[in-house]
Amino acid sequence: MGLLDGKVAIVSGIGPGLGIELARAFAREGADVALGARTESALREAAAEVEGHGRRAYWKRTDITVPDDCRALVAGTIEALGKVDILANNAFAYPPFLLIEDADFTTWQGSFDVNLFGTLNMCQAVIAPMKAQGGGAIVNVNSMIQKKVLPYQAGYAASKGALTAATRSLAKELGAYGIRVNQTYMGWMWGPPVEGYVNGQAEALGIPREQVIAEITKDIPLGIIPDDADCANAVIFLASDLARVITGSGLDVNGGEWMS
């Protein structure tokens, strides 16, 4: 028995790292999974993973900044899989890493378009079918960066901070319809993107990988970079009935690096 037996989940932002781990985790816990992203190869790979767990998969190339794409993904999911119980919003985009005093704020727009408005496009698309079936769960993948503020990342932090406010507002608006809306504040996550960063830093600085990792983990009480798969489990929890009385909440998933 899985935590999500009989459920249908949509996951956006399928790609290396957390995206494909979410697809695996939802399938492992018994859900059929619909997948959205701009890269067809990533979608095909994730669909094969889902089907390898004995679950049904549906995928559609989706740009979440385009409302029609989001509506088409949801409509296709309902046609192929019968319903939508869960939406996990994972897609994200970074603006250039610059100090605010040096930033061209027009370059922040792309990050806001994905991290805030794109996420809300997906939320809008599932609200009507979730209302019609009497409930559902939305989990927005947020970031620790808006809490543990760092130089050069103000644009990304601002877009994620706006997402926090929107998530809480949605939870207030949709609670009466049995739709829960929560978010996870992810920190460092060990997977292909972070592994690539670690390898790049080690090569650029001429130091061992272990030294780069030690610099990251010195601020993490658990002493590890949390694995993508473990971070995906936090999303599963909030999507499951174990969290059926939790809405408008944010869960820190960072090994204790930031405690709010």
Image (cartoon, rainbow, N blue to C red):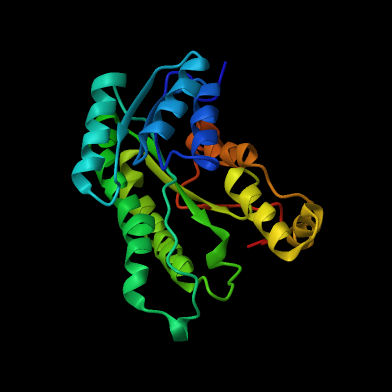
Residue 203 in the image: state x and y as whole percent.
Answer: 71, 58
In the image: residue 159, left or right of residue 20 = left
Quarter of the rendering occupied by the N terminus: top right
Report the residue at 27% width, 49% height from top.
Answer: 121
Is any atom of residue 246 visible in this view? yes
20 is higher (above) or lower (below) than 123: above
Q: Nearer the viewer, residue 91 or 171?
A: 91
Image quarter for residue 169?
Answer: bottom left
* Residue at the (48%, 73%) spot, across then down: 154
Residue drawn at (35%, 58%) of the image: 116
Percent x, y of residue 246: 50, 44
| Quadrant occupied by the C terminus | bottom right
How many labels sit on residues?
0
Frontmost residue, 97 versus 120 = 97
**Residue 37 horizontal side relative to residue 126, left or right:** right
Residue extending farthest left: 68
Locate residue 51, reporting x and y percent. 46, 17
Residue placed at 37% from the left, 39% from the top? Answer: 39
Percent coordinates x, y for residue 86 in the rendering? 40, 34
The answer, for residue 129, to whether it is visible in the render is no
Quarter of the image for residue 56 reads top left
